[in-house]
Image: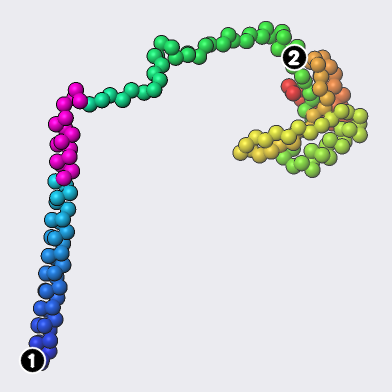
Amino acid sequence: MAGKANNNTWLILVLIVVAGIFIVMAFTKEKAKTPSVQAETASVAAVASVPLSDVQTIKPAHVVPASEVAKPKAMPAVVIPPQDVLAREILAVQVYSFKEKARAEAALSALKNKGYSAYIMVSDLGARGTWYRVRVGTFANEAEAKKALERITKDFKSGIIVNE
């Protein structure tokens, strides 16, 4: 038992010596850092002691005064009388609107078989998805569109006049 205690004592002594060496090395590194901090402090003090008359001002190569900077010019508003807007409207008759492309194509075929100049307009409605709108013709005025709507609703029981 005495031999074991003696071995433990030696182990403790070795650990203490190793710890002491690490402590000495740590303090040595701290002292090595101190002169560079002192040198930095000295250089800052040297710069601060230079009189302002000896400091040169660096000017930009080209300076444009604020009075010469171009300001955006306002554009006049374009005003269109309501009668001109209505004259430019292109109207169509929307007969159906489907989420499924196959259903829209079937409706298109049925309309064309009856002699209507039909087409599909694809509308992406974001979160609501893509819709396939089956429409007939383009009409220059409301009277033409209403006449076509009457014929279409007789044949297909559906339809609404829309702006193209």
Label 1: which secondary element: helix
Q: How far apart are marks 2 and 1 (CA)?
A: 113 Å
* Residue ID at (16%, 26%): 51
Question: Which mark is nearer the camera, 2 or 1?
Answer: 1
The mark found on residue 115 in the picture is none
On the image, which quarter does residue 139 sit in? top right
Residue 45 is covered by the magenta coloring:
yes
* Residue ID at (15%, 64%): 25
**Of the residues shown, which amino acid type is indicated by label 2?**
Arg
The stretch of residues the image draws in magenta is 39-54
Q: Where does residue 1 sit, x and y in percent of width and height?
A: 10, 92
Q: Name the residue under label 1.
A: 2
Q: Mark 2 points at which residue?
A: 88
Q: In this view, does 83 lie above or below 163?
A: above
Q: Where does residue 39 sit, x and y in percent of width and height?
A: 16, 45
**Of the residues shown, which amino acid type is indicated by label 1?**
Ala
Q: How many marks?
A: 2
Q: Is residue 84 above or below residue 27?
A: above
Q: In this view, does 142 lie to the left or right of 72?
A: right
Mark yes or no: residue 138 visible.
yes
